[in-house]
Amino acid sequence: MTNKTKNSKKNTFFRVLAVIAILFLLTGAVAAYALYQMSVRSALTRDVWLYVRPGDTRDSILVRLDGGGMDPSRVFWVERSMDYYDLDEKLASSDCSGAYLLSIDLPPLRVVSRIVRHQQTPVRISFNNVRLSAQLAARITEPLMIDSAAMMEALHDTEFLSTLSVDTATVLTLFLPDTYEVWWNISAEDLIYRMYREHEAFWTPKRCSEAQAIGLSPLQCSIIASIAEEETHNRGEIGIVARLYANRFRIGMPLQADPTVKYAVGDFTLRRILNEHLATPSPYNTYLHAGLPPGPIRIPAKATIDSLLQSREHSYLYMCAKEDFSGTHNFARTLGEHQRNAARYHAALNKLKIK
């Protein structure tokens, strides 16, 4: 073999090595570029809440992202990240439903992995000024996946409620107005159970002891607090009002609370309670039925319950709105004193022709 032939073969070998090296470099460069695009560079233009429902597919999620916060130039890399995690298979084989807060700095792989690994973000629910279960169901489910119909069904599931020692009338006492963090895809039953745990945590041994000192159970405190909250919005006297009804209940005196009549009638705008209203047949009408109503007539605030528990002992049995329409009340220990207070109030109503 001549030197020329040997050199030719040697040159060919090095050229092949060079081509292979270049291919390796190109492959590595492509892989590094893809890795950068999928795992480093952000996929979003802003923080995004992504809600994944049962039955969602890769395409439906992609459309949702594409229409709300995803950088249009990043669609390809989000799709490749979905391929990498085989998102459709994961969605079909496991529950990935939930709410995901995707921050602006998340790259495509992290966006998809949050869904695949079911790394949900809690959502906040809050409620107050609620009187009826239907009102509660609509308010509390508004930011959640469950709808108000499912919540209403759970609130009337007597078998389920019995496990929490409540019924359809008393279940609302479990709900204490506040702001709570829950999973977006929480079930209605789990949500009620969460409220049960919050209720149990609220009723500490100290609060239970304070209720016992007044002669009431936690349930009875909640019902009386609900009546007091309907009677007055004045925080300075709400404890006095609540203790007044506790006094009536303790001695077996009819509560005769006007707010229970409004609840029975179903008209919370009534300014004046007439004889026709007092005759409304309802277990909530405390003019017709002795003792406490079957359940609360609204969901009382924690502060209202505490106002009852921490109220000073007094001997008031009667109350009447003040004739100056200040929203406060005149309190009385005797019927005669109460009748004089009521006469002044009704005279003021008549003067203004308020019915």
Image: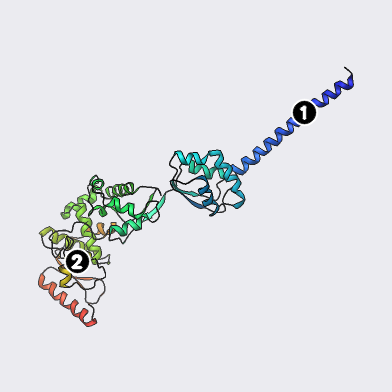
Residue found at x 21% / y 78%: 349
Along the viewing direction, whichever of 336 and 77 lies nearer the viewer:
77
Q: Amino acid at mark 1?
A: Val
Residue 140 image point, x, y percent = 35, 55
Between discs 1 and 2, the one toward the N terminus: 1
Scheme of colours in the image:
rainbow
Q: Is residue 123 left or right of residue 47?
A: left
Whether label 1 touches label 2, CB < 8 Å: no
Q: Is residue 292 left or right of residue 7?
A: left
Label 2 Cα neighbours within 10 Å, binned few <14 / some 14-19 / many ≥20: many
In the displayed structure, would residue 303 be above or below residue 199? below
Q: Is residue 246 left or right of residue 57?
A: left
- The amino acid at mark 2 is Val
Q: Residue under circle 2?
A: 261
Neighbor class of circle 1 (other Cα within 10 Å; few <14, some 14-19, many 20+) is few
Q: Which residue is mark 1?
A: 16
Quarter of the picture containing the N terminus is top right
Rendered location of residue 168, percent (x, y):
23, 53
In front of the other: 285 or 291: 285
**Disc 1 element:** helix
For the view shown, which residue lies furthest in the top direction?
1
Q: Secondary structure at mark 2?
A: helix
- Image: 342 above or below 158: below
Across the whole image, how many numbered discs are drawn on residues? 2
Residue 64 position within the rendered picture, expressed as x and y whole percent measured from the top left: 51, 52
Please indicate, yes or no, whether residue 309 appears anywhere in the rendered image: no
Quarter holding the C terminus is bottom left
Q: Nearer the viewer, mark 1 or mark 2?
A: 1
Residue 304 sits in quarter: bottom left
